[in-house]
Image (cartoon, helix red, strand yellow):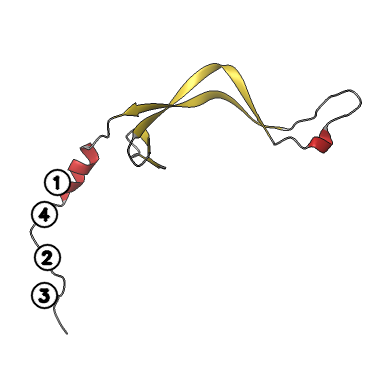
Amino acid sequence: LVIRGANDDFAALCTANQVFEIKTAETSNTLLLASPLDSSLANKENGCISLKVNSILHSKLELTQCVPRIRRIRQLLEENPYQGHFDDEENTTRK
């Protein structure tokens, strides 16, 4: 998996054969991210568990399958047009 995208474009999650657009979606629910539970922290007497909340989130990332966009590839190819076969050894000046 790889995440790609230019600063002025959307982020895309790319697999070997699929592309997904990544969007941020606001949610009315609050998501609390906590550290993994250590069983020794559980209070055996009253059943209470103490957790440390590391982050509070009000949005989530959504993936939507999309068609790969080739605009950037086309732009790069236009900036560097193919000029035929080029052999570095033949075109290098020897000193």
Q: Which mark is residue 82?
A: 4
Q: Does 93 appear above or below 22?
A: below
Q: CA distance from mark 1 to mark 4?
A: 9 Å
Label 3 vs label 1, nearer the camera: 3
- The foreground one among 3 and 16 is 16
**Image marks 1 and 4: residues in contact by CB distance under 8 Å:** no
**Image marks 2 and 3: residues in contact by CB distance under 8 Å:** no
Q: Position of residue 35 (x, y in %)?
A: 69, 36
Q: Which mark is residue 90?
A: 3
Considering only order in the chain, which callout, 1 or 2, is on the residue closer to the N terminus? Answer: 1
> Which residue is at a point 36% across and 30% down the rendered structure image?
21
Q: CA distance from mark 3 to mark 1?
A: 26 Å
Q: Position of residue 64 (x, y in %)?
A: 38, 26
Q: CA distance from mark 2 to mark 3?
A: 8 Å
Q: Amino acid at mark 2?
A: Phe
Q: Which residue is mark 1?
A: 78
Q: Amino acid at mark 4?
A: Tyr
Q: Does 44 appear above or below 38?
A: above
Crowding near the residue tagged with mark 3, few <14, some 14–19, many ≥20 C-alpha atoms within 10 Å: few
* SS label for mark 4: loop
Q: Which residue is mark 2?
A: 86
Crowding near the residue tagged with mark 4, few <14, some 14–19, many ≥20 C-alpha atoms within 10 Å: few
Quarter location, residue 20 = top left
